[in-house]
Image: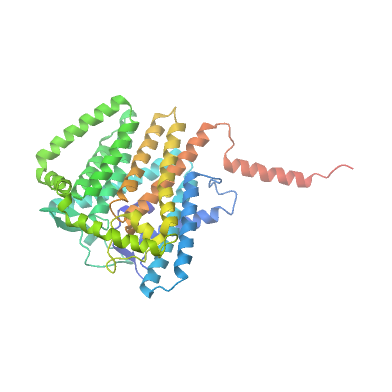
Amino acid sequence: MFALATLVVPARLVVRGTGISLTPADLVALGMGLTWLAAQFVTNSGVAKGRAAARTVASFYVAVMFACYGAANSSYLPADERNLLDHSLVLAVAFAGVTLAVCDGVRTLDRLDVLLKWVVSGGTVAAFVGAVQYLFMFDLTTYMVVPLLRYTSDDNPTIIPRGGQLRVAATTGHPIEFGIVCTMVLPLAIHYALRARRAGEPAWPWWGSATLLLSGMLFSVSRSGVLTLLAVGLVLLAGWPPRMRTRALVVVAACSIAVLMVAGGLVRAIYNLFANAQADTSITARQHRYGQAAMEISKHPIFGRGDGTWHFPVYNAFDNQYIMSMVETGLLGTTALVLLFLGGIYSSIRARGKAFSDPDTRDLALSVTASLAAPLVGAVTFDLLSFATITGLTFLMIGAAGALLRITREQESPTAVPWRVRARNTRAARALRSKVTPTP
């Protein structure tokens, strides 16, 4: 439900009648967090207990957000910034709840595969909507309104001209976000295509998803999408065996030639984004804002001025999440964000090392690592946490990495008693001891 609500429901749609703007995905995330919290008070729910890297970094992130919230409320804030501060805290708790619920609630590889396949399906739908927007200039999101939902604004177009080409946002809030979302989901589609081929099953649906996702990244016409695609490709090439790496390079070369022949204008537009970067007003404007960012950081270096309080259009966007985090949540909040990314990547890398005898699990761990490399790099080029789709998907994938590490650890110790059985045996032992009377 969360994957589909995040990727398929247009990001501009929010629930009617709420005091703050909450999307359907936000409500599902709050429900997941509440369910996880309730499961921690009982011993028979089947939810995992104990430490895990993803669980630790998510908990630390929430604690830091509360600390920054308290520091911001200790001084005067305008009413609009105070409302945004409250909204940001609710979203931080909700998205951390997604990470915790997935990390501790997904206990088997089959369940994890189901979740990630729904992620691929949702990303494919978003890519299809983007393809229709780009090829036919037809916005399907205007017909995706359902009862109880409303648009936050009508002045946020999903089809934007740039450099003689169109750039589209699909169901996300911005073309840059759309490009990075496509690159995040792409390695998962490739993984399930390769797995289906090894198992002798039809692989063409997954290859079709991968093609749509790659096309969606191109249709976003953004530098961020290209940079994150390079990061994802480098991670995959570094982890694949030499034979698969060679095949992948041949396929990339063939696809590049095909794209040049079919959509040469689109390729030239993307190339000009890098060739003319020095003269690009969007880049020069960002550079001019760095001095303003340094001045704001110096005012509140530890806790920041308040999460969500540096908002557009009142203030200029920095187009860099790490700088934005330094301004809004200070050094403490930025450290928590970086640890959040690194905790997910660490979990997937460790899971890959533990699954040395299972090639499918090793490849899945590599794909999750590549997926998490996209937001880590993309946060350098745009305000990642200001966009709901990419934020929700990032927290979901961090939880998936934590779940994968838990699963591989349990498989590494096949003699270990399942957690639910261990809890039941402990209660039985206590009841037995209470009935035994000591001998004089």
Spot occupied by residue 374 in the image (x, y as percentages of width and height): 32, 45
Q: Which image quarter: residue 428?
A: top right
Residue that protrudes farthest toward the top in the picture: 243
Query: Is 277 positioned to the left or the right of 303 in the image?
Result: left
- Which residue is at a point 12% across and 39% down the rendered structure image? 260
Determine whether, in the image, residue 389 is placed left or right of residue 70. Answer: left
**Residue 52 seen by the camera:** yes
Q: How far across and how far down the image is residue 388, in percent?
A: 33, 57
Q: Is residue 196 above or below residue 42?
A: above
Of residues 62 and 433, the one nearer the viewer is: 62
Specify the quadrant of the image occupied by residue 171.
bottom left
Pinpoint residue 46: horizontal percent, then vertical percent: 54, 46
Q: Nearer the viewer, residue 357 or 165?
A: 165
Q: Quadrant of the C terminus?
A: top right
Indicate how the structure is coloured in the image. rainbow
Residue visible at 46% across and 43% down in the picture:
403
Work out whether residue 10 can be spotted: no
Between 422 and 245, the one lying in front of the other is: 245
Number of marks in picture: 0
Residue at 17%, 32% in the rendered image:
254
Residue at (33% x, 27% y) in the render = 241
The correct choice, above or below, for 440 with respect to 90 in the image is above
Q: Position of residue 365 (x, y in %)?
A: 39, 37
